[in-house]
Amino acid sequence: MPEPALVVTGLSRSYGTVRAVDDVTFTLPSGGSLGIVGASGSGKTTTARIVVGLEHADAGEVVVRGRRRGDRARGRAARLARAREVQMVFQDPYLSLDPRVSVDALLRETLRLHFPRLDRSRRTAELLDQVGLGTRAAGALPRQLSGGQRQRVAIARALAVEPAVLVLDEAVAALDVSVQAQILNLLADIRAQTGISYLFITHDLGVVRCVTDDVVVMRQGRIVESGGTTQVLDSPQHPYTQLLLDSVPRPGWDPRAIATARRTP
């Protein structure tokens, strides 16, 4: 069996008296796609930020391709190598790109930092093609692109450094439903082509069912259920997982009852 892309063990993080992440453990196989779901405040985004390195854990460890990420990287080369291991695509494509920098300049600068000897013109064209943007988009500024196009640029920037793990934090939540489908199909194609591993952070169970192999359900900082996506969503074993499924609007849906159940410890 190939080495897992990501192993998270005993991860914990507190803010004062609030335990945002509490003994979280999971494994993301090489080439796999894992979803972390839960309501706001469940700890899923904090977990993702620790994996990426934007926050530090109080306890536990994160291992990417057999290398522990908790140790401080010393020197520019080590910091760049660490950054290449895990990349993140954020929720809002309107804020994640520099409005003053064209698509071409953005990708070229990323490549210059990480692969200075690479043919940047050729690689930039490859990346734009990979995310479904033609070379016509290369000279555009972010304000000249649609939300879906901007998110494709953000994905291209992340893919440019050839990460082992791509973390997608509500990466389609700000997009129209039709555009969401396009981006999710794009991500599925990229995973099939490259073997990259995805960590999806989302509250949308439809997204989880569409693009993940396995799922972790979090509540109040802890994992309450995990397993294969189809198994967990079709036959939930924990009441909170069932509550999340019941929260999806459908005929006969009672939002007041759902809200009351969510407030129950």
Image (cartoon, rainbow, N blue to C red):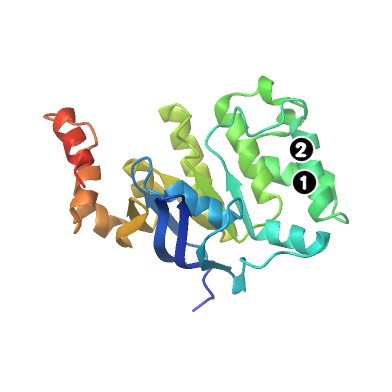
| x and y, in percent, of residue 260 in the image | 17, 35
**Residue designated by label 2:** 106
Give whichever of 188, 249 is nearer the camera: 249
Residue, far left: 252
C-alpha gap between disc 2 and disc 1: 6 Å
Give whichever of 84, 8 is nearer the camera: 8
Q: Is residue 38 above or below residue 235?
A: above
Tell me the residue at 45%/26% (across/down): 176
Residue, far front: 16
**Residue designated by label 1:** 110
Q: Is residue 159 above or below residue 85?
A: above
Tell me the residue at 39%/59% (across/down): 22
Mark 1 closeness class: few <14, some 14–19, many ≥20 residues within 10 Å: some
| x and y, in percent, of residue 1 in the image | 49, 79
- Tell me if residue 9 can be seen: yes
Q: Is residue 52 above or below residue 135?
A: below
**Are discs 2 and 1 less than 8 Å apart at CB?**
yes
